[in-house]
Image (tube, rainbow, N blue to C red):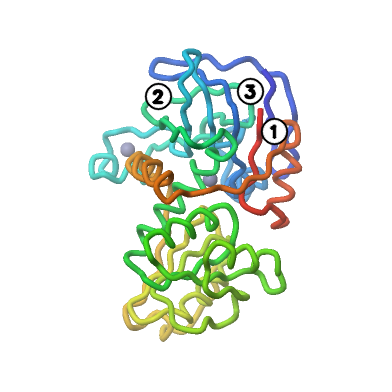
């Protein structure tokens, strides 16, 4: 089968013919129909995250089909131990021995993939493959981030990529008010934020017209954390949704005082997946995607790195 393979961080993926993977006990062999391209893939390919496996096939937003015709989604969380204190307390996202798709396990930048059946999700029928793929990480992690933002009525979103474009729709469905923050001068992103239901959108250094109850930071830029604290009301939370972020600059304690909080979101639980995939068709979440053929995965990654993708990039097999 054909796959896009990472041999060394910092180098482009190579299109190669590799052996079809053999499913072990409990695993399914899936024909990949589409695979979303996530910012985490960029962090893996660029070496911003520690290398876990080489050579590696990236990709963790996989829409696949079993030999008997079942359509399943394969997310980032690929395996957990089921026994550690995190697994046994409903926090399998923090499992000590978790294995992640497209990082510890070969992922979906390929024509076929194997996946542990217990971690695959049935996908809502109304979504074509391309539109379903971004639900599997941008949607899931976005959903978990939104839950961790609590019942915030006035919600700020920093970085209008794939995750924010889905979260915005869920948040509006829940009756929240949205404020979008984009890179200064990025008029296209600002227009996208407004089109997704933000009542205000501006540059990340700008003050919104009123204080916010929570902010979710999707962009991997540490300086956005104090910037977000600065516009929070008392008791508000900044949720950092990415797996990697540049260093957070120091800031005066006054910005955190009055019970403001900063927290990160790590991975997902299967429960997040079940909840979000049930909710998505009710909103209904509509995903905007830009398709790329498998062999152009490097171009999709480059465009994502440069902030040029509107919505989500998806590889189509
Ligand atoms: Zn565990
Ligand atoms: Zn992801």
The image quadrant of residue 234 is bottom left
Q: Which of the labelled discs sits on residue 78, or is there none?
A: none
Say which residue label 2 marks.
117
Q: Is residue 1 above or below residue 52?
A: above
For marks 1 and 2 on the same chain, the one whose residue lies earlier in the sequence: 1
Q: Is residue 229 above or below residue 93?
A: below
For marks 3 and 1 on the same chain, the one whose residue lies earlier in the sequence: 1
Q: CA distance from mark 3 to mark 1?
A: 18 Å
Q: Which residue shows up at 58% across the image and 31% down it?
A: 108
Packing grade of label 3 (10 A; few <14, some 14-19, many >=20) is many
The image quadrant of residue 55 is top right
222, 297: nearer the viewer: 297
Query: Marks 1 and 2: which is nearer the front?
Result: 2
In x, y percent, where is residue 98? 40, 37
Marks counted in the figure total: 3
Say which residue label 1 marks.
7
């Amino acid at each position: 089968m054909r796959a896009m393979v990472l041999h060394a961080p910092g180098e482009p993926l190579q299109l190669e013919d590799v052996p079809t993977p053999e499913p072990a006990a409990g695993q399914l062999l899936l024909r990949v129909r589409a695979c979303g391209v996530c910012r985490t893939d960029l962090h893996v390919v660029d070496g911003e995250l520690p290398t876990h496996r080489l050579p590696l096939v990236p990709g963790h937003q996989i829409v696949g089909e079993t030999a008997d015709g079942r359509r399943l989604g394969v997310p980032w969380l690929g395996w957990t131990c089921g026994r550690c204190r995190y697994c046994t307390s409903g926090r399998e996202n923090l499992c000590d021995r978790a294995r992640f798709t497209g990082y510890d396990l070969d992922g979906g930048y390929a024509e076929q993939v194997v996946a542990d059946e217990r971690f695959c999700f049935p996908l809502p029928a109304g979504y074509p493959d391309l539109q379903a793929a971004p639900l599997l990480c941008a949607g899931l992690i976005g959903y978990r981030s939104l839950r961790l933002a609590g019942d915030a009525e006035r919600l700020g979103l920093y970085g209008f990529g794939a995750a924010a474009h889905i979260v915005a729709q869920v948040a509006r469905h829940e009756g929240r008010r949205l404020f979008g923050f984009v890179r200064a001068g990025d008029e296209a992103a600002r227009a996208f934020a407004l089109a997704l239901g933000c009542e205000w959108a501006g540059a990340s250094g700008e003050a919104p017209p009123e204080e916010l109850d929570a902010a979710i930071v999707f962009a991997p830029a540490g300086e956005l954390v104090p910037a977000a604290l600065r516009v929070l009301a008392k008791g508000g939370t900044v949720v950092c949704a990415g797996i990697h972020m540049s260093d957070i600059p120091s800031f005066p304690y006054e910005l955190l005082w009055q019970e403001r909080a900063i927290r990160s979101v790590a991975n997902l639980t299967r429960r997040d997946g079940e909840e979000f995939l049930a909710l998505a068709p009710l909103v209904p979440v509509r995903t905007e995607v830009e398709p790329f053929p498998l062999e152009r995965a490097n171009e999709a990654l480059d465009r994502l790195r440069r902030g040029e993708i509107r919505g989500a990039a998806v590889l189509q097999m």
